[in-house]
Image: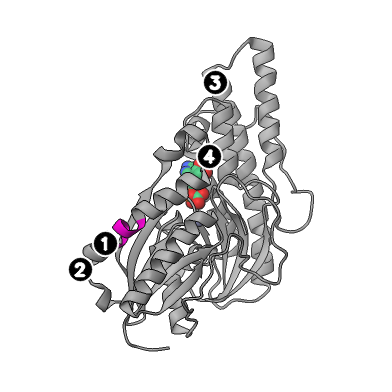
Amino acid sequence: MTDEAITLLGLESSCDDTAAAVVRLSDGRGAILSSVVAGQADLHAAFGGVVPEIAARAHVEKIDLCVEEALARAGLGLGDLDGIAVTAGPGLIGGVLAGVMCAKGIAAAAGLPILGINHLAGHALTPRLTDDLAFPYLMLLVSGGHCQFLIVEGADRFRRLGGTIDDAPGEAFDKTAKLLGLPQPGGPAVEAEAAHGDPARFAFPRPLLDRPGCDLSFSGLKTALLRARDGIVAEKGGLTRTDRADLCAGFQAAVAEVLAEKSRRALEEYLSLAPAAPAFAVAGGVAANAAIRERLRSVCARAGVRFVAPPLALCTDNAAMIAWAGIERFRLGLIDGLDLVARPRWPLDLGQPALIGGGKKGAKA
Ligand code: KG4
Ligand code: ZN
């Protein structure tokens, strides 16, 4: 480890956000000098999901502009950088390629080292940038594309305790919203409806709670919601506001309960390692849900474990997390060459079999 400051440019383009950021480590602390995120939600809205070809084209068009803006906002030029970190997977391959090719071009032209970052490692290492967490800590990634429990043992060492065997929870929130005629992204809309609904009116299933371990499943929940909706429509000819709110409340309560119970189990496994400063961190858009966040917070309080939720802008896809993961690897001397490859699938924990199933936002690794 060096005491010298390290400044990296980070690039992210694995899904539907084109992003560039500059992050600096000095005196042992990371600081975000700039973070630019250009979303594509408007381009995909009419299709009800991310269209890989449209996403890839938009990344190619926007990534150079994002880099220019990130450098300008940081007040730096390429000559001030120590390297370039880029998401090299997992994700939609056209987008990942756009980022990797851009990073290679800059690295070759400016004579800078390049660092290929696993997108999930970017999410998983963020709590060290925001909250200075010490290894090992427990991480729950919950978004529209990811759902897994990881023990983060080091910048390059991750142990996967379990994850979804089908949909990610954000995907389930989005589908629920669609089934109930609510706007996208579904999470915030369903949460707002649930706030004035009765969570006990519908007995939705708690998938996989009867099985040991930390794996999760959300696709059955979506089917149960569809059946409940169709039942009401068949009986009454349509949904009232109360019906909709009760359906949302029941769905959200089921997701929260499953996530809380699986988190409790993951914590048990993590605590058996006797970490000196136990901590549980969440990342991903679903962590914005107040009801879910509170359930997780109380699971942690009962287990005597610190609960950390980075600010939302750093929980969702961004390039600061990629630059930071790059800094962590740079310190370990884990630098790549210009032969770096873009990977559609890239499990963080190589000791575990890769998950089957892609999901609407691409591979979940
Ligand atoms: O992390 P993110 O911005 O993007 C990726 O999926 O990579 O997460 C977006 C997901 C969407 O599915 C969205 O519906 C969900 O997070 N989400 C929420 C809430 N806010 C966003 N889900 C539940 N409650 C929320 N308040
Ligand atoms: Zn992500």
Most distant residue in the right direction: 211
* Count of marks overlaid on the render: 4
Residue at label 3? 242
Residue flagged by tag 1: what amino acid is it? Glu
Q: Which residue is at a point 31% across and 62% down the rendered structure image? A: 67
22 left or right of 183 in image? left
Q: Which residue is at a point 64% across and 40% down the rendered structure image? A: 254
Residue at label 2? 75
Instruction: Label the magenta part by its dominant secondary structure.
Output: helix
How many other residues sit within 10 Å of disc 1, few (<14), some (14-19) or many (≥20)? some
Q: Helix, strand, or loop for circle 3?
A: helix
Is residue 217 something that shows in the picture? yes
Residue 124 in percent (x, y) is at 52, 65
User: What's the magenta region?
Assistant: 63-68
Residue flagged by tag 2: what amino acid is it? Gly
The response on whether ligand 1 sits within 8 Å of label 3 is no
Q: Quadrant of residue 327?
A: bottom left
Q: Are marks 2 and 3 in contact (CB under 8 Å)?
A: no
